[in-house]
Image (cartoon, grey):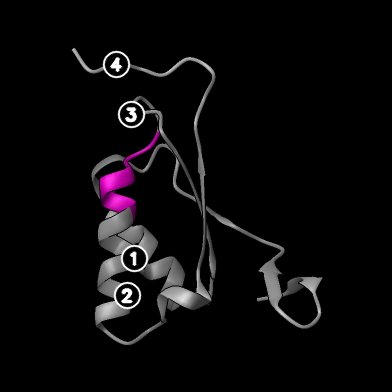
């Protein structure tokens, strides 16, 4: 995957992210497959209606366990909307 240098001595941020919205029950498996395919940037958000952050974490955990990637190689972008959805 292509990267954009944030600081040539420290970081290389991915220029393309894998988006996790609207994947529902398939989120974990699809995040795992995205990492396996070479994605190092994962985009998620604290919005249960559109994102499954638990599934995102499961896919990342499995990829790390299987030796596909280390946590230090991943960029996880987690957004917090201005209006937080409170579970009922």
Cβ atoms under marks 1 and 4 closer than 8 Å: no
Classed neighbour count for the residue bearing mark 4: other residues with Cα under 10 Å, few (<14), some (14–19), many (≥20): few
SS label for mark 2: helix
Q: Is residue 35 left or right of residue 29?
A: right
For disc 1, the marked residue is 60
Where is residue 80? Give x, y as percent: 49, 31
Report which residue position mark 3 lands on: 48
Closer to the chain start, of discs 1 and 4, is 1
Q: Is residue 78 left or right of residue 50?
A: right
Give residue 22's position: percent from left, percent from top.
40, 37
Distance from the alpha carbon under mark 2 to that under mark 4: 30 Å
Alpha carbon distance from label 2 to label 3: 23 Å
Residue at 51% x, 77% y is 73
Residue 86: which disc?
Answer: 4
Where 39 sits versus 87, above or below?
A: below
Q: Is residue 53 magenta?
A: yes
Q: Residue at x 54, y 70 (%)?
A: 40
Secondary element at tag 1: helix
Disc 2 + disc 1, Cβ < 8 Å:
yes
User: Residue drawn 60% across and 58% down?
Assistant: 17
Q: Which residues are magenta?
A: 51-56
Instruction: Report x, y in % for residue 53.
Output: 33, 44
* Sequence order check, earlier mark of 2 and 3: 3
Whole-number angstrom distance, CA of label 4 to CA of label 3: 9 Å
Tell me the number on the disc at residue 63.
2
Quote the CA–CA distance across marks 2 and 1.
5 Å
């Amino acid at each position: 995957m292509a990267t954009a240098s944030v600081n040539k001595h420290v970081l290389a941020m991915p220029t393309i992210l894998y988006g996790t919205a609207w994947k529902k029950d398939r989120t974990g498996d699809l995040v795992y497959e995205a990492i396996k395919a070479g994605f190092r940037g994962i985009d998620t958000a604290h919005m249960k209606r559109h994102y499954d952050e638990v599934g995102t974490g499961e896919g990342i955990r499995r990829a790390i366990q299987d030796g596909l990637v280390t946590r230090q190689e991943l960029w996880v972008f987690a957004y917090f909307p201005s209006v937080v959805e409170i579970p009922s």
